[in-house]
Image (cartoon, rainbow, N blue to C red):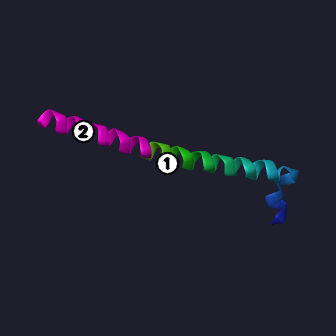
Amino acid sequence: MSDWFAMGGYGFYVWSSYGMLALAIVIELVALARSRARAREYALEVMEEEQA
């Protein structure tokens, strides 16, 4: 099993690449959620202004 994790001596590179990818995906999901929340707030403000 440790040979599989070592991946012929390239294990550190491979697993750190997977880790960086996972981190980038998490950051992107957080950024998208925040952007969506801001867009929703803006849309609600515009709708309230139109009704007034």
> Residue 39 in the image: x percent, y percent?
34, 38
10 or 52, which lies in front?
52
Q: Tell me how many marks there are.
A: 2
Distance (Cα) linking label 2 and label 1:
23 Å
| Disc 2 residue type (three-letter) | Glu
Q: Which mark is residue 30?
A: 1
Is residue 52 placed above or below 21 in the rendered structure? above
Q: Residue at x 43, y 45 (%)?
A: 34
Q: Residue furthest right?
A: 9
Q: Which mark is residue 47?
A: none
Q: Residue at x 87, y 52 (%)?
A: 8
Closest to the camera, between mark 2 and mark 1, is 2
Q: Residues within 10 Å of mark 2 (few under 14, many from 20)?
A: few
| Disc 1 residue type (three-letter) | Val
Q: Where are the magenta residues, as a range?
A: 34-52
Horizontal side, residue 5 vs residue 37: left or right: right
Which label's residue is closer to the chain start, 2 or 1? 1
> Residue 17 in the image: x percent, y percent?
72, 47
Q: Residue at x 81, y 53 (%)?
A: 11
Is residue 44 placed above or below 14 in the rendered structure? above
Query: Is residue 40 rendered magenta in the image?
Result: yes
Q: Which residue is mark 2?
A: 45
User: Which quarter of the figure has residue 51?
Assistant: top left
In which quadrant of the rendered image does the N terminus lie?
A: bottom right
> Residue 49 in the image: x percent, y percent?
18, 35
In which quadrant of the rendered image does the C terminus lie?
A: top left
Query: Secondary structure under badge 2?
Result: helix
Q: Residue furthest left?
A: 52
Query: Is residue 12 rendered magenta in the image?
Result: no
